[in-house]
Amino acid sequence: MTMIRLGLCLIVALAHVVSVPAQDAAKTPAPKKVNPAFQPPEVNPKLPNVLLIGDSISIGYMVAARAAMQGKANVFRPPTNCGPTTRGLDQIDQWLGDRKWDVVHWNFGLHDLKYMGPKGQNLADPKAEGSHRQVPIDEYQSNIETLARRIKQQAKLVIWRETTPVPEGAAGRVVGDSVKYNAAAAKAIAKVGGIQTDPFFAFAESVKQHQRPANVHYTAEGSKLLGEHVAEVIESALAD
């Protein structure tokens, strides 16, 4: 009887051990998909290295820009939404890393000019009591100057990219503020000197039929066109 009991116990124990991996496998979450825009490029050491910095607009055009520059440049971006200039000041050293960039093409604006609520609510009604721009325009201009000087230290070519238009009905933003913030940035860029400007606002206006209704973002076709424009600007700068 003792041997029989031992045998039964062994069978039960083995059954438990075998069942554990199956249970664990059922609980293991599926691997999280990485946004293709955040994937590093396959680096060709013979090609120039390009860094794109910007918010979700740049995330949207990243893949198209990289495709357009395939075989011409290694195109990188920080694996994040770069947000407002305040985040840029905090993380620019990390984003630049230790590489001497051939080109840095960069923008901040849509997150700076958006409205926040009195308790930090995102995309607040601009007309509501206590609402305020995330980064006031004077502070924004100062931040752009600081960032421009820092980026120049680590890039052969620096290209400031204008901020895209705010369409009617876009939550938490005011039509026309992009123009004001672009003007402030232009003063900062001129003060630093030696930086090219990508006239991105005008180009975005030319493809505004591809901007989503009441939304600062673009359709897939719109992002593709923006990415191809960015590639053209960068390729022209590299050719000079």
Image (cartoon, helix red, strand yellow):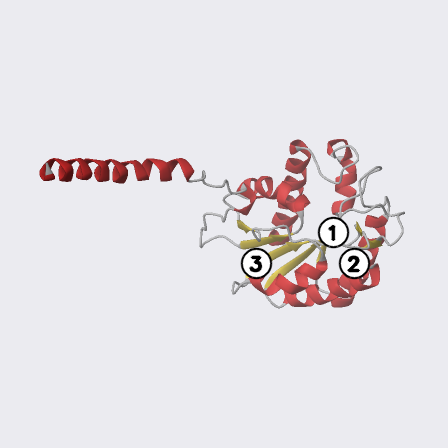
Q: Amino acid at mark 3?
A: Asp
Q: CA distance from mark 1 to mark 2?
A: 8 Å
> Pointer 2 and pointer 3: residues touching (CB < 8 Å)?
no
For the residues marked 2 and 3, what is the alpha-carbon distance in whole angstroms? 30 Å
Mark 2 vs 3, N-terminal side: 3
Residue 173: percent from the left, percent from the top?
A: 82, 46
Mark 1 residue crowding within 10 angstroms, few (<14) / some (14–19) / many (20+): many
Identify which residue is drawn at 72% across, 39% down: 217
- Left or right of 168 in this view: 216: left
Judging depth in this view, the residue of 30 and 214 nearest the camera is 30
The image quadrant where one finds the C terminus is bottom right
Residue sitting nearer the eye, 152 or 56:
56
Amino acid bearing label 1: His
User: Mark 2 highlights which residue?
Assistant: 135
Q: Look at the numbered disc 3 and give the secondary structure of its residue.
A: strand
- The residue indicated by pointer 1 is 111
Rate crowding at label 2 as few (under 14), some (14 to 19) or many (20 or more) other CA atoms within 10 Å.
many
Judged by depth in the image, the label closer to the viewer, 3 or 1, is 1
Tell me the residue at 55%/51% (across/down): 76
> In the drawing, what numbered circle is on residue 102?
3
Residue 8 is marked as none
Which residue is located at x 15 percent, y 37 percent? 5
Evaluate if marks 1 and 2 touch, with contact meaning CB atoms under 8 Å apart: yes
Residue 114 percent location from the top left of the image: 79, 50
Q: Residues within 10 Å of mark 3 (few under 14, many from 20)?
A: some
**Picture quadrant of residue 170:** top right
Q: Is residue 35 above or below residue 158?
A: above
